[in-house]
Amino acid sequence: MTHSVLPVAPSVDVIEKTFADLKARIPRQRALSAKERIAGLDALYREVWKRRNDLKTAMWNDFRKPAEEVDLTEIFVIKSEIKTVKRNLHRWMRPKRMPGGLAQIGSASWVRPEAKGVVLIISPWNYPMQLVFRPLIAALAAGCTAMIKPSELTGHTAQVVAEIVSAAFESDEVAVVQGGVDTATHMLNLPFNHIYFTGSPAVGKIVMKAASQHPCSVTLELGGKSPVILDDMRSFRDAAKKLAWAKLSNAGQICVAPDYVFVPANREAEFISALKRAMLDMYPGETSANKDYQRIVAPHHAKRISILVDDAIARGAKCVLGGDIETDSCFVPPIVLTGIDKNAKILEEEIFGPVLPIIPYTSLDEVIRFVNDRPTPLALYVFSKRKRFVDSILSNIQSGGASINNCVIHVSSNYLPFGGLGNSGIGSGHGEYGYLEFTHLRGVYEQRFDGAGALLMPPYSSWKTNVIDRLLRWL
Ligand code: NAD
């Protein structure tokens, strides 16, 4: 059964009615077996697959995303997430028997995973399908109904996402509400049972504040600056290639993109030359004419990046690779900066674009201090063949996730928790971790026959005082 796609920026009445329908369905949704939930996920993927070409066209129109990257970073990710859920959902949903202690003699206890209820999923534009459907898959696996708000900045894709959902689900099971900040604000006033937000730290704070009205739990998948630390390695070729890919894919618009790189000071020139070669090999010729090179999502974001670069250069930075930023056509070429003043804005704000600052270092302590003086990063990258070097970084710098001798790829695992810490987020998604975000773990206790507790109720006669005393000493 299908329903029609809701109009963009619907009225408050429509949003409230949609919410009421999603809420009314909860008892039925919660009771779905693993098999029935999986059937829903299969229906979702069938509709995605049917619209594979529509998605490619939409993402090209939104920000010239290469078709191959729609397959690799959107459709493949969804398929693989569904596969993981299908393989494990029966096990995840099973109530788990728990052991008891002295106070629970005569009882049984277990944990019952239960759907939280109606959930809100708010998504950003940088992976405009994946970041909507990955949390949705987890919500449906958990037995929730969901209202989704895709980003208004990738409107072509949001429309295809809405069509997919309307073809795969009934309107009281999953509803896509398209719109901008006003629409999101109306949605945030509703008493959802969980909000899964992916986006900037600034909006994450607004979401958290709104959630406190009812209150409800939140998952905040936020952003920030993810540093890279290079050890004094024999060759930088491998690291340079991986960094070039991680920084330029999606034109650097990745929440876990390497944001800046620490290089041993005496090897800076060597690394820059390897990095430039890797970037030019990956995107040969005139970058603006290269069909594999993506655009920035909107002129105001291209402008934001241009301001960061101009500020760094005005403070003395040198552009060792780059060209003109064309804000109107949203084109930002690969840019590598050196000699950056420590107070430059580019070392404070998340770059979220194809610009890579290089910072030379002479001691690991100074690197650790620099990163720890800033908000906790979403990802931390170390390139080294020395275990001691890696261990020292992992134990001295906190981050949401970390990757050794690679960048960004850790996000693709359905078995690792993916999430931030502090300014980079709260909670984790992917695989079972995503399922758990939408699940309430209900502890159930059943008294089968009375244990010692029943004997130790008031009035406290002297023998009871004695038993309590012995109990404490013995325990
Ligand atoms: P954003 O915070 O501007 O917008 C995200 C969503 O929130 C959009 O749907 C938008 O319409 C909505 N929104 C904007 N203002 C709002 C408000 N005042 N109230 C309620 N909703 C509002 O982020 P963006 O520009 O779309 O995405 C880029 C950011 O997202 C970066 O910081 C990036 O690091 C982060 N990000 C994080 C992850 C992750 O998994 N941790 C993934 C992708 C992007």
Image (spheres, rainbow, N blue to C red):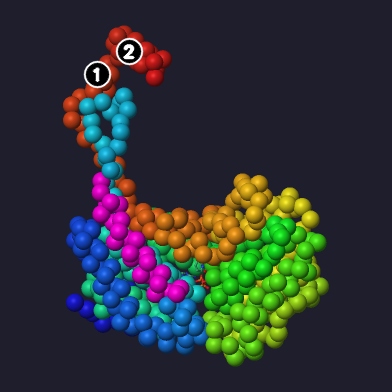
Q: Position of residue 378 (x, y in %)?
A: 56, 59
Q: Nearer the viewer, residue 216 or 152?
A: 152
Please, what is the three-letter code of the amino acid marked with disc 1? Leu
Q: Nearer the viewer, residue 441 or 289?
A: 289
Q: Work out whether mark 2 precedes mark 1 in sequence or the reverse, and give the earlier one.
A: 1
Label 2 to label 1: alpha-carbon separation:
10 Å
- Specify start and end residues of the magenta stretch as a single range: 72-95
Please, what is the three-letter code of the amino acid marked with disc 2? Val
Local crowd size for mark 1, using a 10 Å CA cut-off: few (<14), some (14–19), many (≥20): few
Query: Looking at the figure, which quarter contains the N terminus?
Result: bottom left
Look at 79% across and 56% down and name the residue there: 362
Above or below, 20 against 167 in this view is above
Query: Looking at the figure, which quarter contains the C terminus?
Result: top left
Q: Position of residue 215 (x, y in %)?
A: 39, 55
Q: Is residue 257 visible?
A: yes
Look at 28% across and 43% down and name the residue there: 96
440 falls in the magenta region: no
Q: Is residue 374 visible?
A: no
Q: Please give the residue where the numbered disc 1 appears in the rendered image.
A: 455
Q: Nearer the viewer, residue 294 or 20?
A: 294
Above or below, 394 against 409 in this view is above
Query: Residue most toward the top?
Result: 462
Above or below, 253 against 84 in this view is below
Q: Please give the residue where the numbered disc 2 appears in the rendered image.
A: 467
Look at 42% across and 77% down and name the residue there: 71
Q: Is residue 155 left or right of residue 22?
A: right
